[in-house]
Amino acid sequence: MDSINALKGYGKVNPEHHLEVQAQKIPQPPKRPIITALVISAIVGLTFVIGLMLAALIHESTTEPKDESPSLSSSAESTIKIVCNVTRYPESCFTSISSLNSSPKPDPESILKLSLQVSISELSHLSSVLKTMNSDAAIRDCRDQVEDALSQLDDSVSAMVVGKALTEAKVKDVQTWISSAVTDQETCLDGLEEMGSASVDEVKKKIKKSMDFTSNSLAIVANFKAILDRFSHSPLH
């Protein structure tokens, strides 16, 4: 009888024992404090790396050598541009005068002087080139015209140096001389055009360039009264 009961009980599972086994097999979720600690550690590490990168950039920007080359002040730049705007070639006018200007606050008269210096420099270079060329009639005439133009511009500069004020009479004289210088260069160019020789093409380019600068000076002096009014300078006497 006992053996029969034993057989009946064989294969039966104790419910409590079954629950314990299932409980052991179910994985336990990770603890929240550990995850939080890992996230905080990652954030701190990332912040540290970003801080190092910013520090390196700041150090590089502060230790980088600065450009010590002088630059044109905004006041000087604005003044020169306003004056050059009355010319036919404002860009070449501004560039050439700015390269010579050393004053932080140039006035219209000093800008006109600088413009004349640019014209004289270009004509002097042209004169040197013509002296190295052959003695064709057109070249000789052109050489004479350029020399006369240089003389007219020199007279203009001299008139502006004498006396403290640029009077209306001086302005008229300067305008006449610069106009004559432009005419001289036009005559020179016309003579070279008649030659029809490719050998003078480079010279013609130089003449046109010097004419552009001289015409800039002529435009400035022709509008000088209006320029003075624009800057509220004393009127011409």
Image: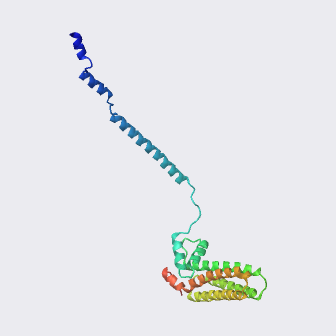
The residue at 59%/77% (across/down) is 92
Whether 54 is drawn above or below 190: the answer is above
Q: Is residue 193 visible?
A: yes
Choose between 55 and 14: the one closer to the eye.
14
Q: Position of residue 218 (x, y in %)?
A: 59, 85
Viewed as shown, does residue 69 lie left or right of 7? right
Quadrant showing the N terminus? top left
Q: Is residue 166 visible?
A: no
- Extreme-left residue of the structure: 1
Whether 46 is drawn above or below 87: the answer is above
The residue at 70%/81% (across/down) is 201
Quadrant showing the C terminus? bottom right
Colouring scheme applied when the structure was drawn: rainbow
Viewed as shown, does residue 152 lie left or right of 135? left
Q: Position of residue 28 (x, y in %)?
A: 32, 31
The quarter holding residue 177 reads bottom right
Q: Position of residue 84 (x, y in %)?
A: 55, 79
Choose between 21 and 105: the one closer to the eye.
21
The quarter holding residue 152 reads bottom right
Whether 188 is drawn above or below 45: the answer is below
Q: Position of residue 220 (x, y in %)?
A: 56, 83
- Extreme-right residue of the structure: 135
The quarter holding residue 154 reads bottom right
Viewed as shown, does residue 225 lie left or right of 208? left
Q: How many marks?
A: 0
The residue at 44%/44% (across/down) is 46
